[in-house]
Image: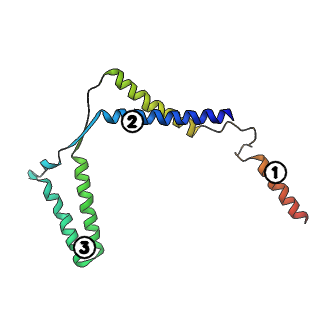
Amino acid sequence: MKEGKNELMQFVAGVVMLVVGLFIFSQRVHVFSTWGYGWYLGGLNLSSGIIIIPLIAGIIWMFATNSFASKVFSAIATLLIIVSVILTTHIRLSSMTLFEWVLIIVLIFGGLGLVAKILFASNKSSDKKNNRGFDTNIKSSVDEELKRMKKK
């Protein structure tokens, strides 16, 4: 029983370490977008507003005809807008001391290691279980029940 508590405590400590490390890391990352400047396509500068035109056309087409093709066109236009926002997003890590960087790395990957150790470790209480992982007491009780049913 004590071993189970130790595993639970290790798992909780790993999750806490992971969350704290990711929180500190997220405080040091700056995310910004340059979506308003537009795209360059074949030497032409397309402003970001032009990317909305296919969505507007798809919505008009969808309300006018309610066809499957209009829904697919609108979905592709929406996907194009999402992709354009993602492609123009920039992520920058702010400057920090080496101690802060090592602390973040230890918290994130140490927490991941503890969680993975508990989640992917084999069950050590194999004294009650056979080589297939089944509880032998349950199997023997089922076998006894089947024998009693055959006798009746």
The disc placed on residue 140 is: 1
Q: Position of residue 140 (x, y in %)?
A: 81, 51
Q: Residue at x 43, y 27 (%)?
A: 106
Q: Do labels 1 and 3 touch, CB within 8 Å?
A: no
**69 up-or-down from 17: above or below:** below
Dot 1: few (<14), some (14–19), or many (≥20) neighbours within 10 Å? Answer: few
Earlier in the chain: of badge 1 and badge 3, it is 3
Please name which of the two marks, 2 or 3, marks the residue nearer to the observer: 2
**Three-letter amino acid code of the residue under disc 1:** Ser
Earlier in the chain: of badge 2 and badge 3, it is 2
Q: Quadrant of residue 3?
A: top right
Alpha carbon of mark 2 to alpha carbon of mark 3: how far?
43 Å
Alpha carbon of mark 2 to alpha carbon of mark 1: how far?
48 Å
Dot 2: few (<14), some (14–19), or many (≥20) neighbours within 10 Å? Answer: some
| Foreground pick, 3 / 65 | 3
Q: Quadrant of residue 97?
A: top left
Q: Secondary structure at mark 2?
A: helix
Q: Position of residue 84 (x, y in %)?
A: 22, 52
Q: Secondary structure at mark 1?
A: helix
Q: Is residue 16 left or right of residue 50?
A: right
**6 up-or-down from 36: above or below:** above
Q: Do labels 2 and 3 touch, CB within 8 Å?
A: no
| Foreground pick, 130 / 23 | 23
Q: Which residue is mark 2?
A: 22
**Three-letter amino acid code of the residue under disc 2:** Leu
The disc placed on residue 16 is: none
Please name which of the two marks, 2 or 1, marks the residue nearer to the observer: 2
The disc placed on residue 62 is: 3
Dot 3: few (<14), some (14–19), or many (≥20) neighbours within 10 Å? Answer: some
Q: Quadrant of residue 70?
A: bottom left
**Three-letter amino acid code of the residue under disc 3:** Met
